[in-house]
């Protein structure tokens, strides 16, 4: 799990995110995990149904409950576009 990944924040992360209170979050930063209880501070942008950021949030969640929905692809692994673009 790293910055840029999209994760599901649901009931497995904390009871406050159960049911329709679950959300998708694009991670910006990840704090250190508390070694005694596995809870972690994360910061990211809440995504709407179209995948657009709607709000920045900082959350304290159970690390084991996070579900990665989409991993960030390194820039070197992304396909390159061929051809040049003409600006008008």
Image: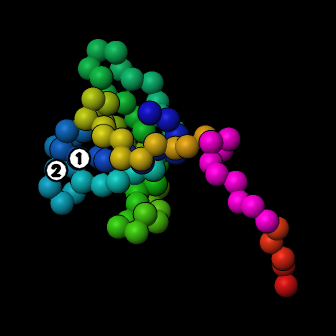
Q: Front-most of 51 and 60? A: 51
Q: Residue at x 68, y 41 (%)?
A: 76
- The colour mode here is rainbow
Considering the image in quadrants, where does the N terminus appear? Answer: top left
Density class for disc 2 (Cα within 10 Å; few <14, some 14-19, many ≥20) is some
Q: Which residues are magenta?
A: 75-83
CA distance for labels 2 and 1? 5 Å
Q: Kindly report the secondary structure that dominates the magenta region of the rendered protein.
A: loop
Magenta span has 79? yes
Residue receiving disc 1: 10
Residue at 24% x, 54% y: name it. Answer: 22
**Image height of 38 relative to 19, above or below:** above
Q: Secondary structure at mark 2?
A: loop
| Residue that label 2 marks | 18
Q: Is 6 a magenta residue?
A: no
State yes or no: discs 2 and 1 in contact (Cβ < 8 Å): yes
Which mark sits nearer the N-terminus, 2 or 1?
A: 1
| Percent x, y of residue 38 | 30, 23
Q: Position of residue 62 (x, y in %)?
A: 27, 32
Taking 78 as reference, is 85 above or below it?
below
Horizontal and vertical percent for residue 69?
A: 36, 47
**Residue occupying the far front of the picture:** 82
Q: Is residue 25 left or right of residue 37?
A: right
Q: Can residue 16 be seen from the camera position used here? A: no
Residue 13: give x, y in percent of width and height. Answer: 24, 38
The answer to whether residue 14 is visible is: yes
């Amino acid at each position: 799990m790293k910055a840029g990944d999209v994760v599901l924040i649901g009931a497995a992360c904390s009871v406050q995110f159960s049911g329709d209170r679950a959300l998708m979050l694009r991670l910006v930063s990840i704090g250190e995990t508390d070694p005694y209880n596995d809870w972690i501070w994360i910061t990211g942008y809440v995504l709407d149904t179209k995948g657009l950021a709607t709000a920045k949030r900082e959350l304290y969640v159970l690390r084991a409950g996070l579900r990665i929905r989409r991993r960030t692809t390194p820039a070197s692994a992304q396909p390159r576009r061929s051809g040049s673009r003409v600006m008008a």
